[in-house]
């Protein structure tokens, strides 16, 4: 069992974030806080990694992980959420066990800063022993540990948080809850965009109707002007006919 809230929270984050990341891979198994038996017939040959990833096995739920039932496939990557009380096991016993099992990368994270300085440590298996994975520091103080096994970066943020970073997308991996919240925000944003688009469409329709009314008014004014011009023409013709008639009668129209 997790010994503290931070230990549990990061155990959950590690398992869920990696499960989501590998959800479309049928040959990758992600689990954590699960009994892992690595030698058949030896009850004590068990370990319980906080988070682990196995490549080349079926992605399905298990009650426990038994290496001999998985064609001898042991974890490729392990994370232990460590503390002062588990220091001896995480620093001595488990590295020896994981090295014998052939775990390619072994990470330790100390969320409360009990003894690891910095709080994250990564090691890769070289021969029979682990060697430190070099890290880089970003401008904001974030420490980046590359994981060749996962194809991700593991970041230790300036506030001490651990996050998995996907360089291809430029985003941190999320838990199911965070992904759900993100999807909800995206849905809300899409709804707002839809509402905005509808308002813009309504505004365009109102402007079109106003333009139609202006066009109709202009056409009526033009028709009115044409009627007035025609009336003026008729008045002019009538006056000319009257003047011609007066001249026929010997009367000067101008007088």
Image (cartoon, rainbow, N blue to C red):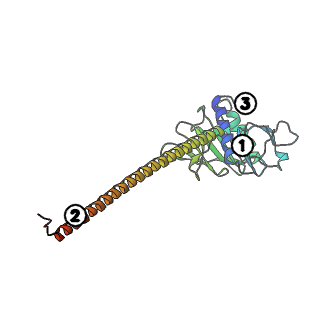
Q: Which residue, as the protein is rendered here, is positioned at the far bottom? A: 248
**Structural distance between the alpha carbons of marks 3 and 1:** 16 Å
- The mark lying in front, picked from 3 and 2, is 2
Q: Nearer the viewer, mark 1 or mark 2?
A: 2
**Which residue occupies 60% across, 34% down?**
111
Viewer-proximal residue, 107 or 196?
Answer: 196
Q: Residue at x 35, y 58 (%)?
A: 223
The crowding category of the residue bearing disc 1, from other C-alpha atoms within 10 Å (few below 14, some 14 to 19, many at least 20), is many
Give the mark, 3 or 2, whose residue is nearer the N terminus.
Answer: 3
Q: Depth check: 79 or 233 in front?
A: 233
The residue under label 1 is 52
Counting residues from the N terminus, which is met first, the one under dot 1 or under dot 2? 1
- Residue tagged 2: 239
In the displayed structure image, the side of residue 50 where residue 214 appears, left or right: left
Residue under label 3, please give it.
1
Q: Are marks 1 and 2 in contact (CB under 8 Å)?
A: no
Task: From the top left corner, tell me how far across and down residue 24 is, in percent.
Answer: 71, 50
Q: Position of residue 203 (x, y in %)?
A: 45, 47
Q: Residue furthest left?
A: 255
In whole angstroms, how far apart are the C-alphas of marks 1 and 2? 108 Å
Residue 19, percent from left and from top: 69, 44
């Amino acid at each position: 069992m997790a010994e503290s809230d931070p230990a549990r929270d990061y155990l959950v984050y590690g398992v869920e974030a990696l499960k989501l990341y590998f959800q479309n891979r049928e040959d990758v198994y992600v689990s954590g806080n699960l009994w892992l038996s690595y030698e058949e017939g030896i009850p004590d040959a068990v370990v319980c990694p906080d988070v682990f990833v196995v490549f080349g096995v079926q992605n399905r739920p298990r009650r426990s992980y038994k290496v001999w039932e998985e064609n001898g496939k042991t974890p490729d990557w392990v994370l232990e959420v460590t503390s002062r009380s588990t220091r001896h096991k995480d620093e001595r016993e488990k590295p020896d066990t994981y090295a014998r099992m052939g775990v390619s990368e072994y990470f330790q994270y100390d969320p409360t800063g009990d003894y690891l300085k910095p709080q994250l440590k990564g090691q890769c298996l070289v021969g029979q022993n682990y060697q430190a994975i070099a890290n880089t520091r970003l401008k904001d103080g974030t420490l980046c540990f590359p994981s060749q096994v996962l194809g991700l970066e593991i970041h230790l943020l300036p506030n001490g948080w651990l996050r998995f970073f996907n360089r291809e997308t430029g985003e941190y991996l999320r838990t199911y809850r965070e992904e759900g919240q993100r999807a909800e925000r995206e849905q809300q944003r899409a709804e707002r965009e839809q509402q905005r688009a509808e308002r813009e469409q309504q505004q365009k329709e109102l402007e079109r109707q106003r333009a139609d009314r202006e066009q109709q008014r202009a056409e009526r004014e033009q028709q009115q002007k044409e009627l007035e011009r025609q009336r003026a023409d008729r008045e002019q013709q009538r006056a000319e006919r009257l003047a011609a008639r007066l001249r026929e009668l010997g009367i000067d129209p101008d007088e």
